Amino acid sequence: MPLTTPSTSTLHASATTHTLSYISALTSSSISTTSPPPTPSSLATAGGSHFLPTITSFQLGHAGPVDHARMLQMIENTFDRFLEDGGIELEAVSHRVEAVSEGSAMVSIVWQRREVRWTNVYFYREMEDGKRG
């Protein structure tokens, strides 16, 4: 059951705004209005700006720390593969934000590219130094 206190309500709003900004940075709706079209590198920069300097990645059965440069490369590689497969279109089908403490929330985004859907889960944190991601 999600926490609901005044501080988690504020956190929920902040995490939701952050999530929607991240979605906007990576999805086709923002890409189609950009001229010239974005490159995988520019999409990585836009998406990567939403992450803290170091994260822990849980991917395909492996977990470990990822620094910001590696995170940018991972995002860019994904869009490189999309481009090789005919385009960089990406849509967010849905998202969910659930505050789990006064300074953190679980975020899930259901992404779709063509006929394929997948869910990514993110952990949003508001750090004492004011950084968010």
Image (tube, rainbow, N blue to C red):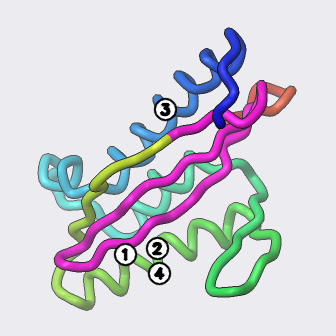
Q: From the viewer's perspective, is 37 left or right of 105?
A: left
Q: Please name the amino acid that badge 3 sits on.
A: Thr
Residue 42, above or below 17: below
Q: Which mark is residue 16?
A: 3
Q: Residue at x 31, y 72 (%)?
A: 117
- Mark 2: give few (<14), some (14-19) or many (20+) Cα within 10 Å: many
Q: Are marks 1 and 2 in contact (CB under 8 Å)?
A: yes
Q: Are marks 4 and 2 in contact (CB under 8 Å)?
A: yes
Residue 70 lies in quadrant: bottom right
C-alpha distance separating marks 3 and 1: 24 Å
Q: Is residue 110 magenta?
A: yes
Name the residue carrying label 1: 79
Name the residue carrying label 4: 77
Q: From the viewer's perspective, is 132 left or right of 22?
A: right
Q: Residue at x 46, y 43 (%)?
A: 96
Q: Please name the amino acid that badge 1 sits on.
A: Phe
**SS category of the residue bearing label 4:** helix
Q: Position of residue 18 (x, y in %)?
A: 51, 35
- Mark 1: give few (<14), some (14-19) or many (20+) Cα within 10 Å: many
C-alpha distance separating marks 4 and 1: 5 Å
Instruction: Specify start and end residues of the magenta stretch as a single range.
Output: 97-126
Give the residue at the far bottom of this rendering. Answer: 84
Name the residue carrying label 2: 76
Q: Is residue 48 magenta?
A: no
